[in-house]
Amino acid sequence: MSNLTLSARAEAVQHSFSGGRKYRWLPLWLLLPSILVLLALQVYPTLYSIYLSTTRVRRGEFMYVGLANFERLLRTPSFIESLRTSLVYSTTYIILTVSLGLMLALLLNRRFKFTGFYLVIIFIPWVISEVVAGTMWRWLFQPTYGLLQSWINLYAPFLGERLYTTSGGALAIVIAAAVWRGLAFTTLLSLGALQTVPQEIIESASLDGASRFQRFFSVILPQIRPTVLVMILLTSIQSINSVGLIFSITRGGPGGATRTAAYYLLQIGWEQGDFGTGAAVSVILFMINITLTIAYLSIIGRRRD
Amino acid sequence: MKARKIAFLVCFALIGALVFNAFGSPAAAQGGTLQIWTKFNDQNPQNTQDRWLADTLARYRAEKGVEVVNTFQPFDQINAKLNVAVQARGEVPDLSYVDSQQLGFFDQNGVLMDLTDWVKSRPWFDDLDEGALAACTTPDGKILCVPSHSAVHFLYYWTDVYPDGVPATTDAFLAKAAELKAAKPNAFAFTGKLAEKVSVERFYYNLIASYGGQIADEEGRAVWANEATMKVVEFVRELFAKGYAAQESLAPAFDNEQPFMRGEAGAFVAGSYSYVYLTPITAPDGTKFEGEITGAFDPEALSVGAALKAGKLGIAPQFAAPGGKPASLILASAWAIPMGAKNVEAAKAFIDFQMTTAENIAYSAAYGAFPALKSAGEADAFKTPYWTEVAKIQREYAIPSPTFADYDKGITLLADAIVRLITNPSLDIMATLQAAQDEYNAGLE
């Protein structure tokens, strides 16, 4: 069969699938199961949350209150405080997780002995459940018998004798635990990206006399920038929605010092049964996440153009 | 390759079995059975309460021929989960354990069925203790639950540390704590749950009441920004600033029990139900008490029972304001039928079974609380020195739950405000209490 005949057949098949009357709806039918699953598991709960955020429950009845829940939330000091805590928690978490992940990946990319073993060790925290990891961290900082707290008391008393029960100390412990757990994710992503950077470019930069820092910031980083941006996006969303570690380490305490907006949502919606306000918090968090996603995607898109 | 395939198939079969078990069992159990929710784990008993439920369900099955399926819910989530199940119109149990202090919250959200007429028609109604019944009755007279027993909060103390008993007032306690600290710098005069919402029920509310204050008014609004709460905050600040209270008191979960259980803290504020959990315990002089949880309730078999008998442990009302009277919040555990329950008659039959004198004794003793039936309270099991002292505290110092319209939110905001004042001594007490109070009251509008 000649090449001409083959391409004519391919064109005919393509035509029948894309423009032919018989197969016009085929793509839609093929996508339908996925669309239905998405509608049921993603779109419906989102729309229902938005509906709930405009209601209040009184004696088992849902009453429409418009935007009153949002208005009240934005005047509630403990919610504003939780947003502030979220900001501190997320910013520190993102900076530490991404930068330390990149550093570890750069080290591992040098392919010294036992790289696989180190990778496994770094990956262990990621597979441990948040509650188990959180409980472990809580015990490490127990005021009287916590292992790390006793080391701090011995070797770094300036950090505080009771880190765990002070506002700043408790937040620092929660952030440290989150970074410890999230590091595996950013290290693996960074390592994957670093391995796609052509060795020749780095070598020629070296031959041109570029220092180690210049090679990283001017050659390697621009090559892996899309991955770094995706990493920042994913860690941002992860930190904004994080609840499990905070629940198992501090339960938002002491005195609300580690209560992020996501934890506030858990308390108000779940523990206190205020669905309307809880849904309003979830809508606000959803909007923050969407805004961040759009911002990051537009940065990535601009770079590609 | 073959080994890999076999491993894959084994994993697949295991996951399949787990999924089948997870979804298959409850569905199979639902037909013709009574579904209940409790905070007790009859499938994997860990204490006398769990063991009591396992025994009771087996006895009920044998006597009445009815299968009861219990779903274990965490103690600090059961009330909230019941509310969520009813509001979401999901699978609600036929009968549930509830805490009486949540009655206002349940009433406001329409979670529980009104049992007034039914309860009044029962043969056990006249035998019900008035205080326990009041805990299940709304201000407008509706009976929404059936009380099983009630518990109060007080101090457990080591007699090695307090040979003459715990000082009765806050001033005297601070003086004694200073003395103890000077003698033993690493020991603590006191520990207890002083953070998170339950700290209000166990400690702060009682102390505020002893200073003559209140935390909620009759309309359910917060009124905690007052002189009494300020005095309490000043007292607690001093406890922590001078190292008299163990730092674990501000930690989450049950860490606060540890200093007392290790003999490092002299006194521990808790409920009458706490003796079930305090095991093993070590006195400050190193004597160890290791109770075993046996099938039937036996106070001597538990660590606290053994320590009390040995004269190493004592109980006393919580310290009060100078010149004030000690106070102790009374909490009732109850049964309630949620809205949407399918098997209401079976639920009522189970309550009837529970409200016999013998069953009420068994449940109350295993839980560590005073029976709601007067006839059960007369039983020998509640005539021991421990229960006699508990009964005295309950009779003389019991105070009802605060009347918050939004109970959990109220006690959470107050506890958080007090903990912030402890961890940040430069914060202005009255301004912080007022801000938290305003936030709560704004939410009611």
Image: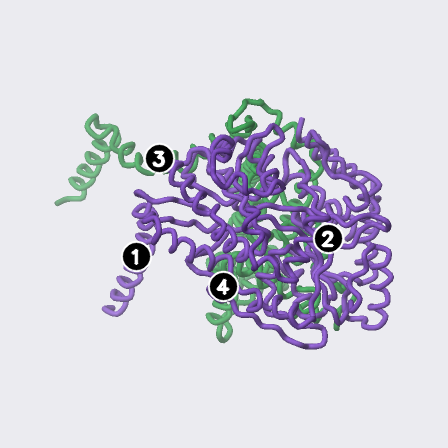
Chain colours: A green, B purple
> Element under label 2?
helix
Q: Identify the residue position indicated by label 4 in the image.
A: A123
Q: Is residue B61 left or right of residue A167?
A: left
Q: Quadrant of the N terminus of chain B?
A: bottom left
> Which amino acid type corresponds to the residue marked 3 in the rendered image?
Ile
Q: Identify the residue position indicated by label 3 in the image.
A: A35
What is the spatial separation of the Cα atoms under label 3 and label 2, in whole angstroms?
A: 46 Å
- Expressed as whole percent of the image width and height from the top left, the position of residue B408 reads 63, 41
Q: Identify the residue position indicated by label 2 in the image.
A: A167
> Which amino acid type corresponds to the residue marked 4 in the rendered image?
Phe
Q: Give me the disc on residue B17.
A: 1
Pick the residue in front: B175 or A35. Answer: B175
Q: Nearer the viewer, mark 4 or mark 2?
A: 2
Q: Are marks 2 and 1 on the same chain?
A: no
Residue B374 shows in the view: yes
Residue that appears at 78% across and 52% down: B422
Residue that appears at 52% across and 46% down: B78
Ranked by sequence position, the earlier of labels 3 and 2 is 3
What is the spatial separation of the Cα atoms under label 4 and label 1, in whole angstroms?
A: 29 Å
